[in-house]
Amino acid sequence: MKNNGKSIFKDTKIEEGFFLLKFQNTGKEKQSFIKEVSNNYIQLFFCIQGDGKLVFNNGRYTIDVLESKSLVLFNPQQNLPINLEVAPNSKIIVILISIKKFHSFFSEFSKYITFLKDENQSKKYYSAKDLSPSEIVVLNQIFKYNLHASLEKLYTKGKVYELLSLYFNFSESNDLDKCPFLEDEENVEKIKKAKEIIIDRMAEPPSLNELANEIGLSLKKLKDGFKQIYGETVF
């Protein structure tokens, strides 16, 4: 882990050919992170909070990494180094996984995944989509680790596998079975609004009851929803 007081970068090896990168910028200026990545790796970007920007070709081309969005990049034709600019008050998770390792996970479903199809394995691939509420829950759990340090590797590995399972899930009907509260996008927006209110009124924060009334949720749903989405209590 690298921590300069204003930013945190942690690079964790899950398995051979499988890495988790965590970026957090707590400063007031953007922070840049650079990492060499070979052309046999798929890159998955998940923005939990704030935003970032991927820079290519010495700044001639950029891709925004926006809050509650994800990106998948794969270029088998050449190495694709990560040059990531992370905005202030932002958190981004990156998963790097070799195409060989990835194929071992999803070989039975390769017909559903564009870059695993035989005719596409030598082609560039780019995809962007919104993160589902269930994916956001797991991402926050990955970022905010609260167990004993000796369990961190096992916990992180399990959560990363869970994230990939959700992200490449082909059955829409069970997307949120384990988290029924988050099936309603309106509930998710209310919880996000609660967080904005807390940040905006940090000097004089409302009580839990006042906050629940303001966003239109019961106190229990506020507490449970906040915990599910952000991995921590409201206060």
Image: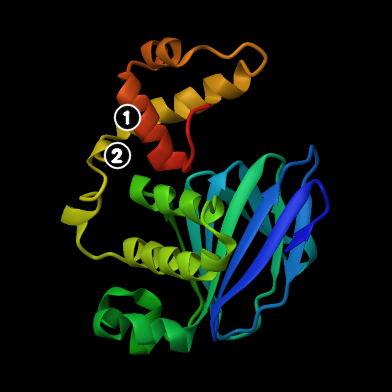
Q: Nearer the viewer, residue 178 or 153?
A: 153
- Going 33% across and 15% down the picture, which residue do you hit? 216
Return the mark for residue 22: none
Q: Which sits earlier in the primary sequence, circle 2 or circle 1?
A: 2
- Going 80% across and 41% down the picture, which residue do you hit? 29
- Crowding at label 1, few (<14), some or many (≥20) Cα neighbours within 10 Å? some
Residue 132 position within the rendered picture, expressed as x and y whole percent measured from the top left? 36, 48
Res. 188 image quadrant: top left
Residue type at mark 2: give it: Leu
Q: Residue furthest right?
A: 4
Residue 105 position within the rendered picture, expressed as x and y whole percent measured from the top left? 35, 81
- Going 66% across and 82% down the picture, which residue do you hit? 79
Q: CA distance from mark 2 to mark 1?
A: 7 Å
Above or below: residue 207 compared with residue 130: above
Which residue is identified by label 1?
Answer: 187
Labels 2 and 1 touching (C-beta < 8 A): yes
Return the mark for residue 182: 2
Res. 200 image quadrant: top right
Quarter of the picture containing the N terminus is: bottom right
Instruction: Name the secondary structure under disc 1.
Output: helix
Residue 120 can be seen in this image: no
- Going 30% across and 81% down the picture, which residue do you hit? 110
Residue 207 position within the rendered picture, expressed as x and y whole percent measured from the top left? 49, 12
Instruction: Name the secondary structure under disc 2.
Output: helix
Q: Residue furthest left?
A: 173
- Crowding at label 2, few (<14), some or many (≥20) Cα neighbours within 10 Å? many
Q: Nearer the viewer, residue 122 or 218?
A: 218
Above or below: residue 63 compared with residue 201: below
Residue type at mark 1: give it: Asn
